[in-house]
Amino acid sequence: ADRVLARGGRPFHPADAWGRLIPLALLSGAALYLAGFVQSGFWRLVFVFVAASFVTGFLVQLRRGRGRTDERGRVDPGGPEAVAAFFMPWIGWVYIAMSSTILPQLAGERSGSLVFPAIGLASLALLIASIQFGRRSARAIARGELSEVVSEGRLRYPRTFLRHLSRRVFGLDLPREEVRALREVHLKAQRGMVGILGPNGAGKTTLLRLLAGILDPTGGKIFLGEIPLQKLRKHLARWLGYLPQDFGLPKAMSAREYLDYFALLYEIGTKDERRERVDRLLDEVGLGERGDEKIGGYSGGMRQRVAIARTLLRLPPVIIVDEPTVGLDPRERIRFRNLLSRLAEGRIVLFSTHVVEDVAVACERVIVMAEGRVVYDGLPGELADQAAGHSWQYHAEAGELPELGGDTLITDQVPEADGSLRVRILSAVKPHEDAVSTAPTLEDGYLVLVANHNGGLAR
């Protein structure tokens, strides 16, 4: 449909739907006739719901014929047809209940307990409700009205599972928008700390999950050393430690108990060897004196350090950390950055962030991503050079900030003692007659790279 529209064509015409109404009406009538003719309860059930599906299809085509669709021919939600389609399976349920249980019981043609028929009808009603709920969720996800992943709130993991299930089971016929999370990414990491910088949605998490072996690439290859990652899948956890954005920690356990439990799962040596490694890791992450306290009483930064200690239990040569400083206060952020810097001695540490300060202070190399592509790969100190000739500053009276063009970006507004504002601007040309050129910062270089990739500041 998209290709037809791109060429100026019309992928759907309401007249196409009218031609399908008569066949669907005939099929619906045939299924209803068979449902009333057969004596078997099973086949009656089958034909009733086959008829209900044909009637639902008839209603969908009727709505398409009335022109209640988008330009691709997808039916708009709502309308009397949608209401009737919702009740179709319930009408079938009532018919089954009346014909198989209620009417025979009233006519004295049925004897025995009604427990099993009642259980069967209740199970059928539950199945109908589940299918309708799943279908409704799948449609909402396909339209973008509902996220497939529940990121917060109670029971978010079961709810996420149910939404995944609804999308895959009840949304097979619904359109899926292909998302290219990464494109033409080529990089090689050796030792040291590598920061992956980019805005939300740039592809940072997808890249790290690919490197950690959680996702399989649809194209290209990943190597650890000179061995394809796919061949190391069963043993990858011994060589690579991965700390995702959302890591669950049991609040009722102490850090020492938690790490000892995972050391046992990882089959790390004897009991004494596990205890020695856990004690050493707790000291290394700065929790040696508080290792016996419950995790529930830790701050966010302390929980991050417990999680990083867990990734170090197997002493992996590669550590991957996804946005580790999100939600941390400045002191904890500095402490965690310093911890990662120490861990990078003799290892590869990859960590993603959208905070420029994190890579400026801690990283030996920075990779900037935008819309799934690597737009910069080099030294942090040279990142500012990307904004050469784009950084401007001028003073404006309070409340009198002039309108600037669409290719400019205000990065800072600092109040001065005299009541004026010191305004910092990124622009490819002089944005104001009183603006003066200034030395660019690392943040300026990052913002210019991202904006230029989106067709913003470059001239």
Image: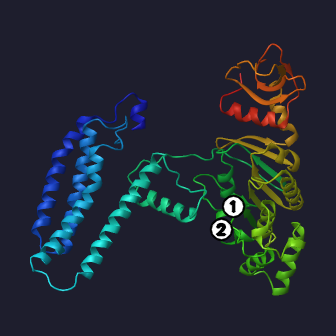
Dot placed on the residue nearer the N-terminal end, 1 or 2: 1
Q: Is residue 311 visible?
A: no
Quadrant that contains the N terminus: top left
Residue at coordinates 29% horizontally, 49% vertically from top-left? 83
> With 65 as the anchor, is 355 left or right in this view?
right
> Mark 2 = which residue?
233
Using the rendered view, name the quadrant where residue 291 is placed.
bottom right
Q: Position of residue 225 (x, y in %)?
A: 76, 61
Q: Position of residue 439 (x, y in %)?
A: 88, 28
Q: Position of residue 73 (x, y in %)?
A: 34, 39
Element type where label 1 sits in the image: loop
Quadrant that contains the C terminus: top right
The structure's colour scheme is: rainbow
Q: Is residue 331 visible?
A: yes
- Nearer to us of marks 1 and 2 is 1
Q: Which of 110 and 321 is in front in this view?
A: 110
Using the rendered view, name the quadrant where residue 417 is placed.
top right
Calculate the distance from the C-alpha at mark 1 to the C-alpha at mark 2.
10 Å
> Mark 1 = which residue?
212
Q: Position of residue 447 (x, y in %)?
A: 75, 34
Q: How many marks?
A: 2
